[in-house]
Image (spheres, rainbow, N blue to C red):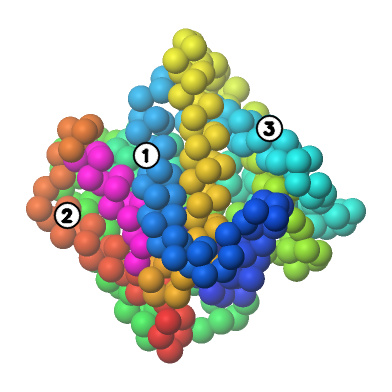
Amino acid sequence: MTAIRHENRLIINNKYDGRFTEGFGKGAMNTEQQKKYAPMGLVVGCVVFGLGSVIVAHVPVGAYAIAFWRLTVAAVIFVVLSRWSGQRFPANRRAQRFALLAGAMLGADLSLWHESIYAVGPGISTLLNSLQIFWLSMIGVLWFKERLSLLQTGSLLLAVAGVVLIGSPEFRHNGNALWGFVSGVVSGLMLSLSMVFVRKAHQEVHVPIFPMMFHVSLGGMAALVLPMLLFNGHNWLPQTWSDVGWIVVYGAVMQCFAWGMIAFSIPLLPLGLAGLLLLSEPVAALVIDFLFLDKAISGIQWLGAVLTMVAIYLGSLKKGGS
C-alpha cells in the first residue's frame, strides 16, 4: 500500500495511478470535486483495508488459502469490470509476463502478511508490512543504482529503532514473535517487488487498470495453488457459509473497493499529505488489535509504533521535500 504513494522510478507513479479513474464512465466527478473528497476517500480506503486483518485473524482458513481465495474473488470482479468498461490487456507478452509476476509477488506478500497476523496480531503485522517503503529504497540502490538521501537514511535508522522497541517486549512473551516479525518484514519486500513488476509491465505498454488487476490476481492465484495444498491441505476450504461470506467480503471489499479508493485518491493529493494519511492503515490496525482483539501492547511498543510510523512518513517524501 505504501508503495503506491512513493514517487520513484520503481513504482506506479501518480500519472499511472490516475488511470484508475478510466472506465468509470461519463458521470465521474470533475477534478475539483475529486480533490475535495480525496482525503476522506484515502482514509476510508486505508481503514477498510486494515480491517481485512481482522477477517484473516478470525476465519479458520490457512494463510495461503485465504490469500488464494481473496485473489480469486478479486479476479472475478476485475474480469467483470474489464468487460463492463471495455478495457482489454494489450497483446504484449512481456507486459503480460510482468503482470503475472507481479501477481505472484502479491500472493507471497499476502500469505506472509497472514502468517504474521497469526503470529503477532493484525496491528504489528500491518506496521511491519508498511516498511516496504524501505525495501523499495534498497531496490533502487541495488537495481537502479540510485542513492539514498540523508532524509531516507535517517528515516531508515528511525524505523529500525522503532521495530526494536516493538519487538523487544514481544519476544519476551510470544514464542511466535520471530516468525511473525520475519514474515511481516519479508511480506513488505514481496509487495515492493510486486510494484516493481507492475511498473515494468507498464513500461512495456500502457495497460488499463482493470485488466492489469485481473492479470495480477491471476498470477497470484497460480503461484499460491501449490503452497496452499502443501501447507494448508487440512484447512484450505471454508467450512461454513459464514466463512465463505467473510472471504467474499475480504476479496471484494479489501482487494477491490479499499484498494480502489486508495489508488483513486493518492494522485489527487500532495505527496506529503498522502503519506501522512496512508499511516491511518497501520494506526487503525493497531487500535483495532488493542481495543477489540485484546492484544497486549506495552507503552514501549506504542512508542516504537509511533517512531516507525514517523519513519515511514519521512521515507515516503521525495528528495528535497514534498
Q: Residue furthest bottom?
A: 320
Q: Is residue 235 left or right of residue 156?
A: right
Q: Which residue is rendered at x = 24% and y = 39% of the image?
A: 289
Q: Is residue 270 visible?
A: yes
Q: Which residue is mark 2?
A: 302
Q: Residues within 10 Å of mark 1 (few under 14, many from 20)?
A: many
Q: Position of residue 44 (x, y in %)?
A: 39, 50
Q: Which segment did they paint magenta?
A: 276-290
Q: Is residue 293 above or below residue 285?
A: above
Task: Tell me, yes or no, whether the highlighted magenta stretch contains residue 277.
Answer: yes
Q: Which residue is rendered at x = 73% and y = 38% of the image?
A: 79
Earlier-in-chain disc, 3 versus 2: 3
Q: Position of residue 18 (x, y in %)?
A: 62, 64
| Tag 1 secondary structure | helix
Badge number at residue 51: 1
Q: Which residue is mark 3?
A: 76
- Report the magenta stretch's main SS: helix
Q: Residue furthest right?
A: 91
Looking at the rendered structure, the kind of residue marked 3 is Val
Looking at the rendered structure, the kind of residue marked 2 is Trp
Q: Is residue 229 above or below residue 255?
A: above
Q: Is residue 99 left or right of residue 274?
A: right
Q: Which residue is rendered at x = 45% and y = 74% of the image?
A: 271
Quarter of the picture containing the C terminus is bottom left
The CA distance from mark 3 to mark 2 is: 39 Å
